[in-house]
Amino acid sequence: MIKLNNLEKCIKTKAGPLYLLRQINLEFDEGDFVTIMGPSGAGKSTLLSILGMYDGEWEGEFFLHDHAVHSLKPRARIALNKEHIGFVFQQFHLLNDLTVAENLDIPLSYRDVTKAERQAIVADTLDRFGIVGKKDLFPVQLSGGQQQLVAVARAVVAKPSLLLADEPTGNLHTDQGQEIMELFKKLNDQGTTIVQVTHSHRNAKYGNRIIQLKDGWQVKK
């Protein structure tokens, strides 16, 4: 499903080039539940951003569903992202001028789904996450934990084939975090491929593989 060949990310600084990722070679199979771990600055979120096609400035090869992402133009990458990827951002990235229900509708609007079907899917997702009472509120009216729940709901509402999550339970209390991880496990059991970045060893146990990064390099075991 995903194949990375000699992937590297470098930024220019006054002191010279600074590599955020070096010679990353990975393969993720369909149905994998992969955890990326490592200390701060290891390149975890950078790698996740590249997988989500939010960062296009890198070198190497990246294949997703046999699409050569490294050869695609920006518009084609955006289309591929909308078709296959759900992303849980560490900083939520909810649209502040839209209600909770409208935020959930956005990923569905990119797909071939009728308005009536979209409304039904949004209603079901609101119920599943226990946020029906928040559907007409705006993100600024929610607590941090509530915003995180909405962000996770938005990422999975369109049933993406690949779910990417950057510290998905970082702003949730223990019970809420466990609920989210149980939901991820259920989605994975149903066929969704998941790649998560986390510092939580408890969350990592939900997956079937752990990849360790350090200073931009994959740590060989």
Image (cartoon, helix red, strand yellow):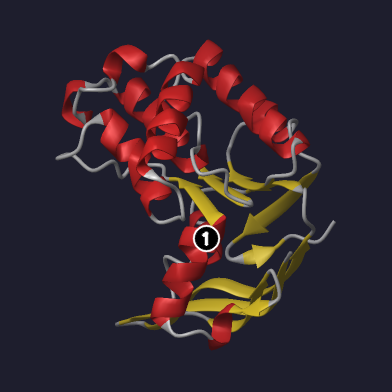
Query: Along the line of sight, which residue is nearer the eye, 142 or 135?
Result: 135
| Residue receiving disc 1 | 83
Q: Residue at x 24, y 21 (%)?
A: 142
In percent of width and height, residue 178 lies at 60, 18
Can you tell which quarter of the image residue 133 is in? Answer: top left
Which one is in front, 90 or 186?
Answer: 186
Residue at the image position 28 percent from the left and 18 percent from the top: 134
**Is residue 92 left or right of 72 when viewed as pictured?**
left
> Residue at image x 46%, y 78%?
76
Residue found at the far right of this picture: 221
Query: At which x and y percent is residue 180?
Result: 56, 25
* 201 versus 17 height, above or below: above
Which is nearer the eye, 121 or 80?
121
Count the marks: 1
Q: Would residue 167 be visible to someone looking at this image?
A: no
The percent position of residue 39, horizontal first and vertical second, equals 57, 48
Query: Is residue 187 something one can see in this rendering?
Result: yes
- SS for tag 1? helix
Quadrant of the image containing the C terminus = bottom right
Instruction: Name the image quarter holding the N terminus.
Output: bottom right
Comparing 7 with 212, the one in front is: 7
Residue reaching furthest left? 97
Q: Is residue 171 left or right of residue 86?
A: left
What amino acid is labelled 1 in the image? Glu
Instruction: Name the residue at 72% across, 38% down.
Output: 188
- Is 149 located above or below residue 7 in the figure? above
Q: Is residue 52 left or right of residue 142?
A: right
Where does residue 72 sit, x and y in percent of width and height? Answer: 51, 84
